[in-house]
Amino acid sequence: MKQDTLEGKAKTKNGIKRLCFSIICIFLEVIFIITIVTRLNEYAEIINLFTRILSGILVLRLYSSDKTSSMKMPWVILILIFPIMGVGLYLLIGLNGGTHKMRERYAEIDSKLLPMLPDNQECLSRIKEKIPKAGNIASYIQRNSWYPIYQNTDIKYFDEAVKGLEAQLEELAKAQKFIFMEYHAIEDAEAWHKIQDVLEERVKAGVEVRVFYDDMGSIGFINTDFVKKMESIGIHCRVFNPFVPGLNLFLNNRDHRKITVIDGKVGFTGGYNLANEYFNYTHPYGQWKDTGIRLEGDAVQSLTVTFLEMWNAVSEKATNDTDFSKYIIHYDYKAQQTGFVQPYADSPMDNEQVGEEVYISMINKAENYCWFMTPYLIITDEMTHALCLAAKRGVDVRIITPGIPDKKFIYNITRSFYHGLVKHGVRVYEWTPGFCHAKMSIVDDCMATCGTINLDYRSLYHHFENGCFMADCQAVVEIKNDLIRTMGECRDVTDQYCTGRSAYLRLGQLFMRLFAGLL
């Protein structure tokens, strides 16, 4: 029997709540119009004028904001055509970035944590000298997210999520001091049970274990007593932004990060959550394609800081760490590899879209080729322009998307972007064996990324995300080889969307794209 994916179900539940609120707003809009027509004829012009003025003020505020036009225009159109519904939806999900108190908490924690990371200016100078275009991107990340570039770190790439899980289980069993795990979604099933067995054994050995997950990402898949169950066996557990009924201004921002840190020495990140379908224990949509990386060495410090940021900023009521130095430790480790690696995080609490800017920077720096793999393709005008311009410069630009969708509605929006890209030379491939959930990019055999950041509005603008920028290392070569193998299993839909009926957007697709930023 066909089942929804874990993230698919969670997002569907989230979408249903938004849909309900939208229906209420539409209902109020209808009542408003009927009232004006039938009962308040003498005041209709005044009320209508007041409403339009209020909407106009909000539209002017949106127009003057720093948001991309792809995010502004849907709100402007919605507010001008349906003032009550538009304003209501904007208050619910348009005010990105959470509450003022949330911003203050993150700023306070970051002011303590981020300065504890090494400056590594010598390493930055080396990458600028060796690979100037990669060094330029590394400099951007360090200047705008405070996460430095490292060497002295060994990187192992996993072309399947299950390989990453097996490596994590092996490393978790070796933990001596602490284990940190942060995931968007956890399913209390077979994959998690394997991890939990190891965590329980480590707790008994005196290891400090912390688990952190997103409530909306895991809702319906973890019982409400999950935290109590974890605490009862000695595993400290926190939940990001627990869902409560009512208007939650922070509902639109979720923790989409995936991080495991063991003793500050070994770290894991990538696209997969801790649920059965990610490891192909179940097959709701054919095969599941996901990837990840293992880091050992100096760069793990950045993953540790990313975890501690969320753990300590999530609640003003919880007891937080007072001494970060016992977790951010420099170990005497001699890496076998000499490549560059830069784990980084992106947050909706600031006005810097680090994830999108890294992708656009890589596209702009590409000279020979630039390839992406993403489960969703819902991009801004800026990224569309960068991809098309690169293709028109003669760069080999390719994007791999799923052949079997987890959400048909989103899949239709993804496909609606194909024509605008392929007509300028971008090639699009759909992975026929199933659903590819990996989030990767690679440029010119010299630099690549692997992490949690999709090519969609939610990842790029609304969620807490993390990624890893890599240059001049074996993992870059392995990512390229994996993408080549994956493309061999894909159908090339470029010509299909360049000419013929598939090339033209239907009215429904245009409507869905208009509100893609609200999903």
Image (tube, rainbow, N blue to C red):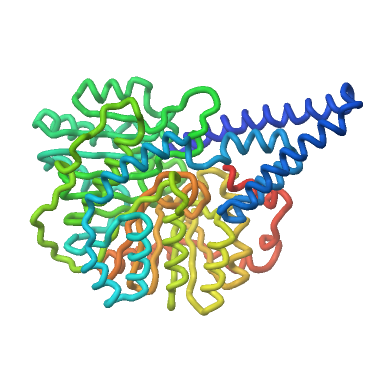
Rendering quarter of residue 82? top right
Residue 365 higher or lower than 239, as above or below: below
Residue 217 higher or lower than 340, as above or below: above
**Residue 371 point in image, percent of width and height:** 44, 66
Residue 57 higher or lower than 222, as above or below: below
**Could you say which is closer to the camera, residue 455 or residue 494?**
455
**Could you say which is closer to the camera, residue 317 or residue 283?**
317
Q: Can residue 483 be seen in this view?
A: yes
Q: In this view, does 189 lie to the left or right of 365?
A: left
- Quadrant of the image containing the C terminus: top right
Residue 53 higher or lower than 268, as above or below: above
Q: In this view, does 438 lie to the left or right of 29?
A: left
Q: Can residue 3 be seen in this view?
A: no
Q: Is residue 512 left or right of residue 313?
A: right
**Could you say which is closer to the camera, residue 323 or residue 494?**
323
Rendering quarter of residue 440? bottom left
Q: How many marks?
A: 0
**Residue 318 point in image, percent of width and height:** 30, 27
The residue located at (42%, 50%) in the rendering is: 437
The residue located at (51%, 50%) in the rendering is: 404
The residue located at (27%, 41%) in the rendering is: 308
**Residue 171 point in image, percent of width and height:** 16, 45
**Residue 130 point in image, percent of width and height:** 27, 77
The residue located at (38%, 33%) in the rendering is: 240
